[in-house]
Amino acid sequence: MLLRSSEHANCGSRDMSPAKPIQSVSDIDYVKHGLTKEFLLGMLRKMIEIRRFEERVERLFLQEGVLIGPSHLYLGEEAIAAGAIGALNDDDLITSTYRGHGHAIAKGAPMKMLMAELFGKATGTCRGLGGSMHVAIYPEKGSVYATAIVGSGIPIATGVGLALQMEGKRRVAMTFFGDGASNTGAFHEGINLASVWKVPVIFVCENNMYAMSTRADYAVAAESVAARAQGYKMRAVVADGNDAVAVYLAAKEAVGFARNGQGPTLLECMTYKLKGHGVYDKGDYRPKEEIEAWLRRDPISGLEAKLLEARLATPADFEQIEKEVGAEVEESVTFAKSSPVLPFDELPKLVYARQ
Amino acid sequence: MPELTYADALREALREEMLRDSRVVLMGEEIGVFEGVYKVTRGLLKEFGPERVRDTPISEAAIAGAAIGAALAGLKPVAEIMYMDFLPICLDQIATQAAKMHFMSGGKLKVPMVLRTQYSLGRVHGAQHSQFFPSWLFQVPGLKVVLPSTPYDAKGLLKAAIRDEDPVVFIESGVLYRARGVVPDGEYVIPLGQCDIKKKGNDITIVAVSRVVNEALAAAAKLDEQGATAEVIDPRTIQPLDLATILESVRKTGRLIIASDDVKSGGIGSEIAARVVEEAFDSLDAPILRVASPDTPIPFSPPLEQAYMPNAQKIIEAAKKLIG
């Protein structure tokens, strides 16, 4: 079912059109794959949580002007965090990036702490010292790092995997990065070492086709990001990153390999940002037709349609989720706004763990 | 008292800490099968096996990054960067990732790792295998920076660094690996952040770092003969820096020389001089002088390298300017 990148001529950066779904799950046997109604609605709920959170964040920046600084929204990529993290156990570990709001929500960080972090408040996930680009650091739920430097989290994930491998409890690590990161030295060094040591890590490339405004079909000199894994004897899979079920199934298989000591996987998920690189970027350097084509493949409405088609959910289920999530988002804003800022004299105490 | 070389003392520290704590894991280029380019890790692969003594590819960013990730997830890695010249290759991982993790996570993340490296000034290694730039690291809040000058300090400080909960850059001196010194049997740990007064004196304070401590002691012996007693202070760690011990000495002697192998501009001497002026200006009877490397790349030619390096004679000349 899953396609190796080398077997699929049209995947990856050479074809930036979404017209040909890389993997179709329209006739998937949900029962056979253990995909219960409860599980699928849970995955949908995570995606809706991310979508509504990010839309609210965007308004807080652009319309209300109460949030400032860099922030990179996960709008349009929700299926990847929900699907890939959905394939993990609670005690598995992830590392995230500056586009990390979605990973944090999917791994179970409380929305109100995420919002408080964006406001720079002491009640945030990083007590207001990290901000949007590090908000996904939430070790309480196994999100052990989020870097703001493109590619730098990849060798770190290799090390997280090494610790889990040596621990011997069959836990795995998963790390997220973009197509742009696959051009950094850290990516190549990190996945090479991961392959040398056969660490239990799933390297999830969220290929949204653009590194800021630079197109992957210009900057990635390979058939795909996944194709690069071949150079490191690493297993690679390409999945439709706008299809949470496809991502989940691909990730589940990769997690299984990692847990069984069969080494790492590079999982490339093809997706597209609904908006630009950062919250202030309109993304208007992208062709209109390309944007429209991807908008027709919205990951949330796509999953909802499949659930309806498979008679696993009703519109009332979706309405209920929307209602609950909407309330949670608003509560998070109220919480963040009313929270205090960390006293400045606390800062020197936080430079070293041992003074 | 038993004597050990600096390299053997370092190995004893690694071995004792590996026996003491199963979370201590070594990784780096040539440290396993080859037993380290300076044989610091001799015998450790045989004793502890390839899981805990891990050879790596030539991938400095991956070595540092993997050490950081392993530290985040419960191990206590000791990573080796073969030459300090290779450290800028992974400076992102050290300065931008590891150093900031505890702070920017609001104190939640801990990175208990040691990055061992060495500088080879004095070993005729040329411009790209001899560099010493501790101030680059000193400028990064969140890192600890250790610079042992004797076998005794090397062992005790490395054990402390491994037990520390923060990222520590442990800078060894390549010319000192074969130097011998007293290392007592049995367990001892030297806390980070304490100067060691290597020699007492009343007339001039010489703060010296790493390899140059021996030069300062040789200079002090000569000065003693000439009737001026020098106090030689080895900071041992420049982050944290035990300024109090330096200030106490300067208040006694009124004169200060800072001697180190880094280039003069923006070096260790610059920082210590500035802090002493801020805190003890009234105690100074003369300008503060720095004996450091000149602001050029390091020359290969052996006589030129010798001329380039700080040494006892240069320290004596500086002292004479101050004492008059």
Image (spheres, coloured by chain):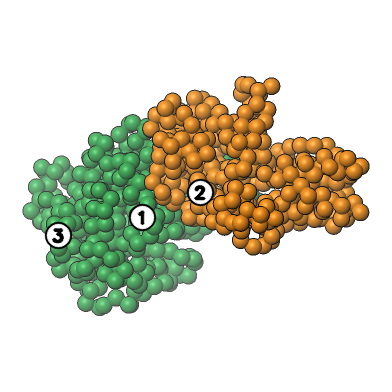
Q: Mark 1 and 3 residues: CB-CB less than 8 Å, in contact? A: no
Per the image, label 3 sits on a secondary structure element best described as: loop
Chain A colour is: green
Disc sitting over residue A187 in the figure? 1
Whole-percent x and y of residue A35?
16, 45
Left or right, residue B82 beside residue A233: right
Where B224 falls versus A190 (above or below)? above
Residue at 12% across, 54% down? A25
The three-letter code of the residue at mark 1 reads Phe
| Mark whose residue sits in front, 1 or 2 | 1
How far apart are labels 1 and 3 at the CA level?
23 Å
Per the image, label 2 sits on a secondary structure element best described as: helix
Residue beneath label 3, please?
A8
Whole-percent x and y of residue B209?
69, 45
- Crowd rating for badge 2 (residues with CA inside 10 Å; few <14, some 14–19, many 20+): many
Query: Dot 2 falls on which chain?
Result: B
Left or right, residue B156 beside residue A162: right
